[in-house]
Amino acid sequence: MGIADDMRNKADDLKGRAKEAAGAATGNEDLKTEGQADQGIAAAKQKVADAAEKVKDGVEAVKDKLTGNS
């Protein structure tokens, strides 16, 4: 988890926004809904990546305390 995941999630979000906008502009409800779904998936992936990063930081802090490297 890192910068590459953040960039990928942001790209997926932007792609979803573009689909939603194109669907709204053309009256294509399926495309609009697909864009909204893509945005939701990107947001969920980002939340998982953020949570994993916090867990990793917590594990490192505990490891540092146990080894005396604080």
Image (cartoon, rainbow, N blue to C red):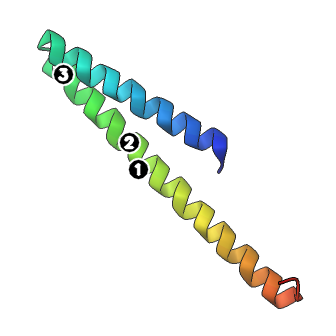
Q: Residues within 10 Å of mark 2 (few under 14, many from 20)?
A: some
Q: Quadrant of residue 8?
A: top right
Image position of 1 (left or right of 46): right
Residue drawn at x 16%, y 10% is 26
Amino acid found under the numbered disc labelled 1: Ala
* Mark 1 or mark 3, earlier in chain: 3
On residue 56, the disc is none
Element marked by disc 3: helix
Amino acid found under the numbered disc labelled 2: Ile
Residue drawn at x 40%, y 46% is 43
Element marked by disc 2: helix
Q: CA distance from mark 1 to mark 2?
A: 5 Å
Find residue 4 and report its horizontal and vertical position in percent.
65, 39
Residue drawn at x 27%, y 27% is 34
Residue drawn at x 48%, y 49% is 46
Amino acid found under the numbered disc labelled 3: Asp
Q: Are marks 1 and 2 in contact (CB under 8 Å)?
A: yes
Q: Quadrant of residue 13?
A: top left
On residue 41, the disc is 2
Give the residue at mark 1. 44
Q: Residues within 10 Å of mark 1 (few under 14, many from 20)?
A: few
Find residue 6 and report its horizontal and vertical position in percent.
56, 43
> Which residue occupies the foreground of this view, 45 or 10?
10
Q: Is residue 60 above or below residue 24?
A: below
Q: CA distance from mark 3 to mark 2?
A: 16 Å
On residue 30, the disc is 3
> Which residue occupies the foreground of this view, 34 or 69?
69
Find residue 7 and report its horizontal and vertical position in percent.
57, 36
Q: Quadrant of residue 19?
A: top left
* Mark 3 or mark 2, earlier in chain: 3
Image position of 15 (left or right of 36): right
